[in-house]
Image (cartoon, grey):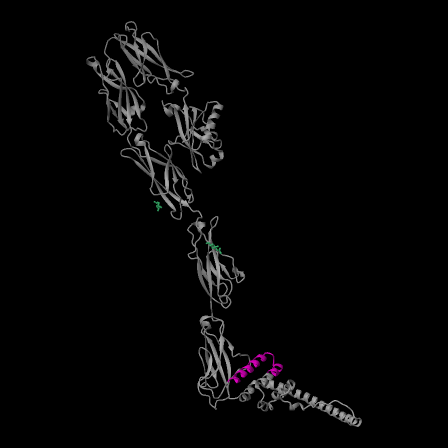
Amino acid sequence: MGVLCCVDGKTSFVWRLLLLIVCVAEMVCGQVRYSVPEEMATGSVVGNIIQDLGLEVKRLRSGRARIFTEDGSEYIGLNAEMGTLVVAKRIDREELCQQLSPCSLHFQIILDNPMELHRIDVEITDINDNAPFFSKKEYNFQVSESASPGARYSLHSAKDPDVAHNTIQTYKLNPPDNFKLNVVSRSDGTKYIEMVLHTSLDREKQEEHTLSLTAFDGGNPQKSGSVKINVVVLDANDNAPVFSQSVYRASVPENASKGTVVLRVTATDDDKGANEEVMYSFSHHTDAAASLFKIDTHTGEITVISVLDYEKAKNYEIDIEATDKGGLADTSKLLIEVTDQNDNAPVISIISLSNPIPEDSAPDTVIAMLNIKDLDSGRNGQIKCFITRDLPFKIKSSSTNFYSLMSDDVLDREIMPEYNITITATDDGSPPFSTNKTIHLRLSDVNDHAPVFPQSLVNAFIPENNPPGMSLLSVKASDQDSGNNARISYFLEDSQLNGRSASAYFSVNAQSGEILAVRSFDYEQTKEFHIHVKAQDGGSPPLSSNVTVKILIQDQNDNPPQVLYPVQTGGSVVGEMVPRSADVGYLVSKVVAVDVDSGQNAWLSYKLQKATDRALFEVGLQNGEIRTIRQVTDKDPVNQKLTVIVEDNGQPSRSATVIVNVAVADSFSEVMSEFTDFTHDKEYNDNLTFYLVLALAVVSFLFITCLVVIISVKIYRWRRERMFYQSNGNLPVIPYYPPLYADVGGTGTLKQALSYEVYGTTDSRKSDLKSPHPFSESTLNVDHCAARTVPRHKTHSEHMFVEVRAARFSLP
Ligand SMILES: *[C@@H]1O[C@H](CO)[C@@H](O)[C@H](O)[C@H]1NC(C)=O
Ligand SMILES: *[C@@H]1O[C@H](CO)[C@@H](O)[C@H](O)[C@H]1NC(C)=O
C-alpha cells in the first residue's frame, strides 16, 4: 500500500510542504494522516486533499468524491468545491475514544470512474476541556478513636476524561493535620488513593473533622475538582473487613445468559458478632456496568443481569466495597472481561458498482468496490472472501475490509450477456458464519461482429419480360450484436453491368434486403447478372459484409420461329421442282427455321398444314424435310402448293408458316408455262405490255430511220460508183451488215432487245422457250427486266426464285 503521510494541522507551513512532496510523489491509492484538536468549530478546515492526495477539483466532481466511514459517523465532511476536509460536527475526543490514546477517525475517500480509494486518518488531539471530578459528593467516615496511625481509608480516585497531561496529575488533602494522602499503584498500573491516619484522633477533643480532597490535572490552565470528607470520631474500636484480593479478575462470554455467576468476592472481618457481618456493594461503577451486573449484598456473588455484547464493551471496571456494621470498609477492584463469541456474520456492502460494463473491458477492470467486515474480533472477525468459481472475475483485497471485484479475462456479450456473481464472505469462527451477496452484472454491447450472410453466393431466377419493380428475392444477413449494432441495412454495391451502373438494373430495399428489378429483361440479350449486396450494421464504426447475387434470366417463349429457307416475302412464291419420275421418298425441299429462344422454346417441329394433295407430300416432324410419299402420276397437277407450319415447344407455343410451291414436271418449259400464270399478275402484265409496245415503237422508228438512211446511202454510192467507173476511181470496200433480227445469238445488245420481245408479250413466250439457248441466261434477263419494272421489294424474291430453278435444273 501507499506510503503513510502525516500532516499535522499545527505544524509549520514549510514542514507541511516537505511532507506534501513525499505524499504526492508516492500517491496511488494513498493514505493521509491529519491531526486536529477536538472541539474545533464546525466548518474548520482539517486538511486539503487536493494538495495532499494530488487530486484535482475536476476529478473530485467527475468521480463523485465522497466519504465512506465504516460506522456511518459523520464528523468530517468533504467540501468537494474546495477540496477540503472540514469538521462537520462537534468532535469530543472523550466521547469518541474515552481513555484511548491516540484517538483517530478513519475513513475513505471514494472516487468513481475509475475507482480510487484513499484512506484518511484524522488524529483527534486532546485539549484540557474537562476538570477532574469526584463521583461522590462527599465521604463520611466513622473512625474509631482507638484507630492507630497507619489505618487506611479507601478513597476513590477522581476522574478526568482528558488524557495524558490533561488528566489528573496530583491530589492534595487539606488540612493535613491528622490524615495524609497515599497514592498507591496497583499491579495492573492503575492508581488509587487512600487516606492514612498519621496522628491519633481524640473524640473528646474534636468529634468531627472536615477535610477537602482536591485533584489537579496538568493542563494549562490547570483545572481541579474537590470532594468533602467528613470524619466522625467513634468511640469504639473495630476491625475492618479485608478483601481476599486487592483486584479481582473475571471473564464472561458475551453470550452469557442472565443469572450467570461471574465471580464471588469475599472479605473477612476479624470482629465477632454483628461487626463480623460484611455487606458488599459496588462503590464506584459506570452506569453501564450497573445495568449489566449485580452484586449480592450478603454473598458477594456477582451475576449477569442483562445482555452482554463484546462489540459494545470489552471490559468493565467496578470498584467493590465490603462494609461491616461498624462502618469499617475495604475496597477492591473487579475487572470483568467480556470474551468474544462468533455471533456476528460478515456484512458485505457494495460501495460502488459499474453495471453494465462494456463487453470489451480489459481484464483487471474494477467492477465493484466492496466493504466486508465482521464485528467479531480475533479469528471470529477474520474474513475469507471468494466468488462463484469458473467466472471470469476475481476478488482482491485492496485494503483492510475493502475488496475490489475485477474482471479476470476477456468478456464477450455474445457468449455470455450477463453474470450472476455471488460473493461469499466467511469468518474463521467456530462454527463459521458466512454471508452471500449476488451482483447481477450485465455486459453492454460493443459492435464487434459484422453482419453475416448465410451464403456468399445466392441464385435468383427471374423470367424475361418481367414487369419493372418485380421482386426477385430477399437477402438476409444476421448480426450477433444487439441493438443498433445489429440493425442491418442493405445496399447495392455499385458495379458495371453491360456498361451501366448496377443501380440501373436493380434496387435493394435498405430495410428488408429485397432485391427488385428496375427494368424488364430480355433473355436473348443478357442471360445472367452478378450483383453484390452489402449488409451494414448500425454500429459506430459500422461493420459490413457482402453477398454475391447471381441473377439468372429465364427464357420465355417470346420469339416465334423464323423461317430461313425457303425465303418468304409478301406476294411472291418459291418453287421446287419434282420430276414425274421421282420415287417415293424423293427429297423435294427442306424447310429451315430457327428460334432465338432457347431450350424447349427453341425446339422446333414441322407439320404440313395445307397441301394441294395431302397424299403426295409429307414434312419431317423434326427436320423439316419435304418428301414425296407416293409415286408421282401423270394425273398430278403441275402446281402443288404446300403450307408448312413451324412450331416451337414453348408454353404457349409460337409458330410460323411458310408456303412452298412445288412444280411436278419433267421439263422446265412445262413448269414455266404453269408458273408464269401466277408469277405475273395483271398489273405487272399491263405495265410490261405498255413498255414493250413503247419499245417496239421506238425500235420500229429506228429501223425505218436506218432503212431510209441506208437506202439513201446506197443510192448515193451507186451514183458515186457510176461516177467512179466512169472516172476509174479507188474507193474502199464497204462491209456487209446483215439484218438485225437475223442475229439471234449475237451481241448482248441485240439479245437484250430480243429478250424484251420474248418475255414482254404473252404471245411470243412459247416460241422463245422452245429456243435452244441456255435457260440461265434467259432467266437472268428476266431478272433484269423485273428489277426495272416491279417495285423494289420484289427484286430479291424474284432473284431467289430464279436461282432455285437454276439449281433444280442442274440435277440429273
Ligand atoms: C441470474 O439470476 C437471475 C435471477 O436469479 C436469473 O433470472 C438469471 O437467469 C441468472 N443469470 C445467469 C446467467 O445465471
Ligand atoms: C465482399 O467482401 C469480401 C470480404 O468479405 C471482400 O474481400 C470483397 O472485396 C467484398 N466485395 C465487394 C464487391 O465489396
Q: Along the line of sight, which residue is nearer the eye, 743 or 526?
A: 743
The residue segment tinted magenta is 783-811
**Above or below — where is 504 with respect to 308?**
below
Farthest left residue?
273
**Above or below — where is 718 with respect to 488?**
below
Q: Along the line of sight, which residue is nearer the eye, 741 or 729?
A: 729
Measured as percent of width and height from the top left, residue 661 is found at 51, 83
**Above or below — where is 471 with respect to 117?**
below
Q: Along the line of sight, which residue is nearer the eye, 103 or 594?
A: 594
Residue 85 visible within the image? no
Farthest top residue?
205
**Above or below — where is 26 with respect to 453?**
above
Residue ID at (41%, 25%): 123
Magenta stretch: dominant secondary structure: helix
Tell me which image quadrant ligand 1 sits in. Answer: top left
Measured as percent of width and height from the top left, residue 534 is found at 47, 55
Magenta span includes 137: no
Farthest right residue?
727
